[in-house]
Image (tube, grey):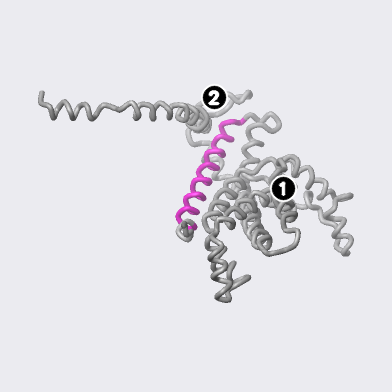
């Protein structure tokens, strides 16, 4: 055996540093396998089986759950409600936070108080915020109808009218998310070099023009992040829907895909885990498609430093 061969074999042996690196990855791999891979595999398996009265996997049915689901008019209605909810929450939540942050950057007396006030919703849990808005939407003593009556406008069934129920839940969701969005965008503005705004002011591009051509483009990474995260959170929204509009609202007007999964698997002792798992897999596919589209379309317009 030549010296070069021995050196080559010795070079292929993992070094102690390499072994330590792989060893440190073991906890992460174990957690990922237990809480991601195994549940996903279990969901796929359940979606291919029927369920007995106790929810235990029964006979193998193949893709029957998927065929029944995709061919159902009720499921198409659920998808429409889900995407409508996403549009009603993501766009106002991100744009509203952007407007607030731009206004907070103005030199106004007591601006710190306003910054704290706009960030406060982030501290509320879903249950707390939902209970607060359930009181606001109360048809008899709620603040919302009280204000409408003060201006001579007829009362609205915020949570009982199918035309308003989804909008009411979306308003609650936007209020809950806007505090976090404001914090993220405020951090982004804080990272913008002050020299850029000073140069724009010297060139006469202040106020709206500076925000349009300097601040907003430089906030591209934060805005892209918020759009992706807000879309995922809206597609997975459940707590506020369950508390504000039990049973999916009037005429199923707030029955999103996540609520349908819950209703199929757990509500009224349904225990149809096979059909619920099939819906969960479809939700996962929708999440992946939406995220892929956002990365493929929006990220190209983002300018990183």
Q: Is residue 14 above or below residue 222?
A: above
The residue at the point 58 percent across, 23 percent down is: 56
Residue 190 x, y percent position in the rendering: 59, 56
Mark 2 or mark 1: which is in front? 1
How busy is the neighbourhood of tag 1: few (under 14 within 10 Å), some, or many (20 plus)? Answer: some
Residue 154 x, y percent position in the rendering: 86, 60
Q: Nearer the viewer, residue 297 or 82?
A: 297
- SS for callout 2: strand
Q: In what quadrant of the picture does the N terminus appear?
A: top left
Residue 120 x, y percent position in the rendering: 72, 48
Q: Main secondary structure of the magenta part?
A: helix
Q: Is residue 6 left or right of residue 41?
A: left
Residue designated by label 2: 58
Q: Magenta residues?
A: 272-298
The residue at the point 71 percent across, 31 percent down is: 268
Could one spot residue 296 in this view of the protein?
yes
Q: Nearer the viewer, residue 59 or 36?
A: 36
- SS for callout 1: helix
The residue at the point 55 percent across, 42 percent down is: 283
Q: Farthest bottom residue? A: 204
Q: Is residue 5 left or right of residue 12?
A: left
The residue at the point 57 percent across, 48 percent down is: 229
Q: Is residue 43 above or below residue 303?
A: above
Residue 279 among magenta residues: yes
Residue designated by label 1: 121
Q: Are marks 2 and 1 in contact (CB under 8 Å)?
A: no
Calculate the distance from the C-alpha at mark 2 to the C-alpha at mark 1: 45 Å
Residue 138 x, y percent position in the rendering: 84, 48
Q: Nearer the viewer, residue 125 or 2?
A: 2
């Amino acid at each position: 055996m030549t010296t070069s061969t021995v050196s080559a074999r010795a070079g292929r042996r993992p070094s102690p540093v390499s072994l330590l690196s792989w060893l440190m990855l073991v906890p992460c791999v174990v957690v990922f396998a237990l809480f991601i891979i195994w549940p996903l595999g279990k969901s796929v398996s359940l979606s291919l089986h029927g369920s007995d009265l106790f929810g235990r996997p029964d006979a193998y049915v193949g893709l029957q759950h998927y065929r029944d689901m995709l061919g159902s008019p009720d499921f198409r209605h659920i998808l429409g409600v889900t995407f409508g909810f996403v549009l009603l929450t993501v766009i106002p939540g991100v744009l509203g936070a952007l407007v607030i942050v731009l206004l907070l950057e103005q030199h106004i007396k007591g601006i710190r108080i306003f910054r704290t006030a706009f960030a406060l919703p982030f501290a509320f849990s879903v249950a707390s915020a939902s209970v607060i808005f359930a009181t606001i939407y109360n048809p008899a003593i709620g603040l919302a109808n009280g204000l409408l009556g003060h201006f001579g406008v007829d009362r609205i069934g915020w949570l009982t009218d199918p035309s308003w129920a989804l909008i009411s839940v979306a308003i609650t969701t936007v209020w809950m998310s806007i505090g976090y969005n404001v914090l993220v965008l405020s951090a982004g503005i804080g990272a913008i070099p002050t020299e850029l705004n000073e140069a724009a002011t010297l060139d006469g591009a202040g106020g709206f023009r500076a925000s349009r051509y300097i601040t907003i483009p430089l906030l591209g990474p934060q805005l892209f992040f918020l759009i992706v995260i807000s879309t995922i959170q809206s597609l997975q929204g459940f707590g506020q829907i369950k508390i504000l509009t039990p049973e999916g609202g009037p005429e199923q007007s707030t029955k999103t895909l996540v609520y349908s999964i819950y209703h199929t698997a757990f509500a009224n002792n349904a225990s149809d885990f096979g059909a619920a798992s099939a819906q969960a897999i479809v939700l996962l596919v929708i999440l992946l498609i939406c995220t892929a589209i956002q990365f493929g379309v929006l990220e190209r317009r983002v300018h990183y430093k």
